[in-house]
Amino acid sequence: MSRATLADSGDALLEAEELSTYFPIRTGIMQRVTGQVKAVDKISFKVRRGETFGIVGESGCGKSTTGRSLLRLIEPTGGTVRFDGQELGSLGESGLRKMRRDMQMIFQDPFASLNPRHRIGKILQEPLIVHGIGNAAERRERVAKVMETVGLSAWQLEGYPHQFSGGQRQRIAIARALMLEPKLIIADEPVSALDVSIQSQILNLMHDLQEQMGLTYVFIAHDLSVVKHFCDRVAVMYLGRIVELGDKRPLYSEPKHPYTKALLSAVPSTDLGKASERIMLQGEVPSPANAPAGCVFHTRCPQAMDICRHERPVMKQVAPGHATACHLYS
Amino acid sequence: MEPHLLEIVDLHTHFVTERGEIPAVDGVDLSIRKGEIVGVVGESGCGKSVTSLSVMRLLPQPPGKYAGGSIRFKGEELIHAREKRMKQIRGNEISMIFQEPMTSLNPLLTVGEQIMETLRVHLPIGKKEAAARAVDMLRKVGIARAESIVRSYPHQLSGGMRQRVMIAIALCCEPELLIADEPTTALDVTIQAQILDLMKKLNRETGTAIMMITHDLGVVAEICERVVVMYAGKVVEEGAVKDIFANPRHPYTQGLIRSIPSMNEERSRLYSIPGQVPKPGAISQGCRFAPRCEYAMDICRAQLPELIAGANAAHRSRCWLNTTQEVAN
Ligand SMILES: Nc1ncnc2c1ncn2[C@@H]1O[C@H](COP(=O)(O)OP(=O)(O)OP(=O)(O)O)[C@@H](O)[C@H]1O
Ligand SMILES: Nc1ncnc2c1ncn2[C@@H]1O[C@H](COP(=O)(O)OP(=O)(O)OP(=O)(O)O)[C@@H](O)[C@H]1O
Ligand SMILES: [Mg+2]
Ligand SMILES: [Mg+2]
């Protein structure tokens, strides 16, 4: 089945409903809980089988927390996540472990996620050993193949993580996520540390793997041009909420939410002649511990109206396959 | 012309490993003038971070080894400088934003304590003023609720927030040279724009020179005047940003520019330079890019070309194609 028909069939592999993750704020010597950081605040979306679902938004808006909550690497405060028809909240520790074979994560900080005392060869074999896959020779073969796919050479298997450059470590982290041939990969900024040529290599590779193995990706990134190339649908987050969600083309060509518009206008251009016309957002990102009432974006929105200050806008379809949470469209 | 602030000449930095010595930096020449913003770009693993860590003298020896060349800062040789002298220089005259924020922030100290520590080592200010400045610095790098973030520990911050804390620490002492190693990789465009503005402002107001290591050619176009392109431990091209974008002369640079995903056109496949970076030290003869170069000639595999200029004296490249053309003309 081709990728397009898969994405169109609407068959959801992953489904988040009203997903929330709050972190307690503790203060004073007694470390009493005095508030909450609403890192992810009641977000809902579906990721279709075989598609690439992008999540973009400003630093600190809750992208990584969303990714980790989806895999229950952090316990969400509320809401549900269904993966392949199973509600993850209902699974016990062992059920969750089995499930994780099919859902892998590439972490944002590659160095912190690689064991510094193990050689790369061992790091890559480990997931296979944990899940009892193959014999020693088969495992070595699989490791060698994946290393080649991510553009690393066999001689590098002998090295320790600290002996690699930032970009090389990132590729090791990607290789590790691919080892088990999962159904879903949540990739948190997988190419942001890479130079453009390797970035293209990795994106092409992820794309090929998707075609071959029917992989589904949740692709967290801040580089909007990379997301435009790579994703089928995109969710734009601001302060723990999704403000716009849609098929990539209409979202890029006709962004609806004022935040999405500002975000798209800020992309630096390598076109030296072209003076960029930026919508510079005024004011600072409000605290997720004390989010504004109504629409969380109203404090910085050039088009804010009265209603925006006290009523939270709900996601509404503005065109086929394109929805936004903004009072301008209701 | 202003004299050079930093002058790296024929630097060789090696790693001694079980498998022999790896020439990670293999004869790099790179100079930065006072107040200049220079971009350093190049394939992952080509030696950008090792070059900058060599300047800071932050590579542990062993396995690191300075195998030759010189690094002069305001005329002073740093390769043989004592550790005591380097301590005065680091964070004061030269400061650095490291590529991996999590590993360079202290997990046991709050963000505020780390900024205050740096401030108080370098400036004669009291605790109270340092605390106020720390909050102010965090605001400048675009961190909301700076008053409460100063009291957070690194693990409580998002990737981009950690990166900005690193930037705040590096900028707070107004150094003469700032080495920024991929400073905005974890940042979205709006904050990236804000950070680049902040760096430009620092550059304008205090004359801080910046060595900007980045893989993002958009960032280079945005703030650098000059750019140095590295490949496999060597500089392969350098020149004014506008010349290099308009007329890249080295096939590696040409490939790099072709690989940029553009917002304006949509291709299903991105261009990427075929082949893989050679193992450091594997190619001891000839041009290191030859095995991947579509124009490679016999001479390329036999002899390493020099870094030379064409008609434009400031635009130099290390490629036989350019040399032979010049000879032919
Ligand atoms: N401690 C070490 N031991 C052995 N080799 C090392 C060590 N540190 C770095 N290297 C090697 O030196 C080379 C240059 O690394 P460097 O970190 O400078 O690359 P880089 O240009 O900064 O790449 P990136 O863009 O991926 O950050 C790499 O091939 C790396 O594997
Ligand atoms: N363990 C934690 N304790 C307290 N607060 C946290 C913790 N982890 C994250 N946060 C807060 O939650 C918010 C969202 O963080 P998250 O890491 O999800 O952001 P992000 O969108 O991934 O940002 P970036 O692009 O910078 O990586 C931030 O305000 C962060 O400070
Ligand atoms: Mg993140
Ligand atoms: Mg590096």
Image (cartoon, coloured by chain):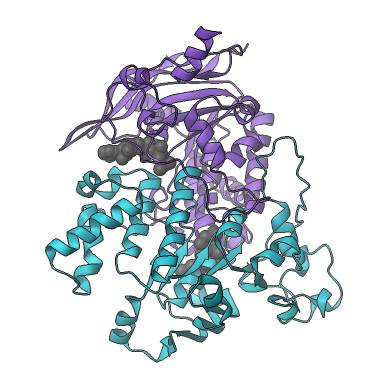
Chain colours: A cyan, B purple
> Residue at horizontal 73%, vertical 68%?
A297
Figure quadrant of residue B225: top right
Q: Quarter of the image containing the C terminus of chain A?
A: bottom right
Which sits in the foreground, A112 or B91? A112
What percent of the width, then of the height, locates residue B219? 60, 40
Which sits in the foreground, A272 or A58? A272
Figure quadrant of residue B39: top right
Looking at the picture, does residue B83 appear above or below residue A73?
Answer: above
What percent of the width, then of the height, locates residue B305? 40, 16
What percent of the width, then of the height, locates residue B131? 57, 50
Q: Is residue B213 visible?
A: no
Looking at the picture, does residue B169 appear above or below residue A324?
Answer: above
Q: Is residue A5 visible?
A: yes
> Residue at horizontal 60%, vertical 52%?
B135
What percent of the width, then of the height, locates residue A243? 68, 72
Looking at the rendered structure, the number of numbered marks drawn on it comes to 0
Residue projecting furthest to the bottom = A90
Looking at the picture, does residue A240 appear above or below residue B287?
Answer: below
Which sits in the foreground, A56 or B263? B263
> Residue at horizontal 73%, vertical 61%?
A253
Figure quadrant of residue B80: top left
Residue projecting furthest to the right = A306
